[in-house]
Amino acid sequence: MLFIYSLENYASRNNFSFSRKCSYFREKHAFKLFHTSKDPVIQRGYLYCRHKPYGDSSCCLWKIKHTYDQSQQCYVLKDDSIFVHNHVLKNDIIVHERKYVKNEKELTIEELSYLEDIGKFHSCSMAKVLETMQNKFPQRAFDRNLLKQFIKKIKDT
Ligand SMILES: [Zn+2]
C-alpha cells in the first residue's frame, strides 16, 4: 500500500517508528477481489506509533486505521484514526499548529495563574490538568512533565 511508504518516510523524518496490526482476506475472497492467490491481502488494520512517552504503562495515541472498501475498491482511512502524537517529534517546535511549551519560563502569566488555580484542586488528575490547559490555550501544547512539576510545586507550598 502506497500510503504506508509515505508514512514510513514521514516517520523517519520525525524520528518515530510505527508498527502494523492487521487482518487478511481469506484466500478465496482475495482471489475474487484481486485475482491473486500469492500473498495474503490486507483486509483491515491499523498502524500505531511505538513511542512510549511516559514509560511502559502508556503509549502514543497516533493510530491510523485503514480498511478495504469494497464499493470504492480501494483502501480508506477510518474516521476514528488519530493523527496526533502525545510526544514531541524530532525537530518539531510546532506540534499540530500548537506551540510546544517545555520550560517553565515559557509559560505566560495567564497560564501560570490558571495553573495555580487548577493546582488548588487536589483531586485533579494529570490527564485532566493537561486536557484543561490544552482546551483553555488552544495554541499551546504543554509538556506533561512540566505541568506535573509545576502542580507539585504549588501543592508543596
Ligand atoms: Zn507517537
Image (spheres, rainbow, N blue to C red):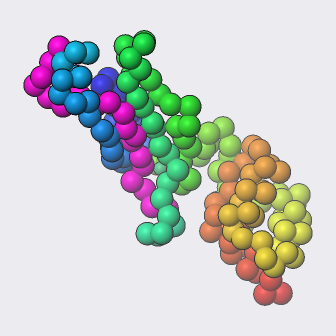
**Front residue (pair 108, 149):** 149
Looking at the image, which residue sits at the far front? 28
Q: Is residue 87 magenta?
A: no
Which of the 4 image quadrants contains residue 3? top left
Give the x, y percent position of residue 64: 46, 38
Q: Is residue 42 magenta?
A: yes
Give the x, y percent position of residue 91: 49, 46
* Res. 90 visible in picture: yes
Q: Quick check: 22 left or right of 150?
A: left
Write the start and end of the magenta stretch as one range.
34-53
**Front residue (pair 35, 18):** 35
Residue for point 41% across, 20% down = 69
**Front residue (pair 129, 142):** 129
Which of the 4 image quadrants contains residue 126? bottom right
Q: Is residue 137 above or below residue 118?
A: above
Which corner quadrant holds the C terminus? bottom right
Give the x, y percent position of residue 30: 22, 22
Residue for point 48% across, 59% down = 59
* Res. 13 visible in picture: no
Looking at the image, which residue sits at the far left? 38
Q: Is residue 156 above or below residue 39?
A: below
Residue for point 54% across, 41% down = 82
Which corner quadrant holds the N terminus? top left
